[in-house]
Amino acid sequence: MNDVDPAEQLPHHRRTVVTEVADAEDGLITVTGRLRDERPWAVDELDLPLVHDIELSLTVSPLDFVVRAVRVQFHAYPHAECVDIAAAHQALVGLTVGRGWNTAIRERLGGPAGCTHLRELARAMAPALLQGAFSARVRVNPRRGQEDPVARAMLPLIADTCHVWAVGGVADQKLVAGWRPGTTTTPVPPLAEYGVPGAAGDGE
């Protein structure tokens, strides 16, 4: 019988994925993802306290999200041959981070053609890149309520990615009604508050 307090037990495994978006040279932006697999219970090196520490960076144009450069770094890995797959990820250059991104990753880097952990990073980095690009626009151009053509051009990239951003859905209807990203705190008020006829809660 295990009499150890569950609150004091260490987890068997801990995976962390961190993504950052920052400016690069020539007006480009870079999204970097880093994945770490750790064994918090490990007491020596043979226990593999750090199984994976892998980094993937994509440099893209903020106007069309086309990948211009790829960098892969293996900081910690279980097999000497793990690093051999790094060059294969140059296949991502020229792809657009947007609709079809996950399919393109599977086609070019699926199974033994790639690395399962780098594929997971690439998938996680796509939505983070979009969030980061919007954050960058607000940071450098914080004009409230004014039209930002670059930010507006980004909107199709999130079309149909969730129920709120469904084509013709609530976010689209709010845009038509005059809402602009960055003009309200979150959560953005419900559709009914924008005077859209037939919206739930509009009193009709």
Image (cartoon, rainbow, N blue to C red):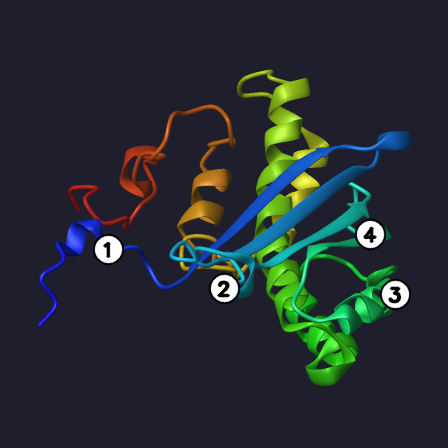
First of labels 3, 2 by sequence position: 2
Q: CA distance from mark 4 to mark 2?
A: 29 Å
Q: Residues within 10 Å of mark 2 (few under 14, many from 20)?
A: few
Which numbered disc, 1 or 2, marks the residue closer to the eye? 2
Which numbered disc, 4 or 1, marks the residue closer to the eye? 1
Relative to 176, residue 185 above or below:
above
Identify the residue shown where x is 12% and y is 54%.
Answer: 5
Is 41 situated left or right of 147 in this image? left
Q: Which residue is mark 4?
A: 71
Find residue 72 and report its image quarter.
bottom right
Secondary element at image label 4: strand
Q: Is residue 64 visible?
A: no
Q: CA distance from mark 3 to mark 2?
A: 29 Å
First of labels 4, 1 by sequence position: 1
Q: Which residue is mark 3?
A: 87
Amino acid identity at mark 1: Gln
Secondary element at image label 3: helix
Q: CA distance from mark 3 to mark 4?
A: 9 Å
Which numbered disc, 4 or 2, marks the residue closer to the eye? 2
First of labels 3, 1 by sequence position: 1
First of labels 1, 2 by sequence position: 1
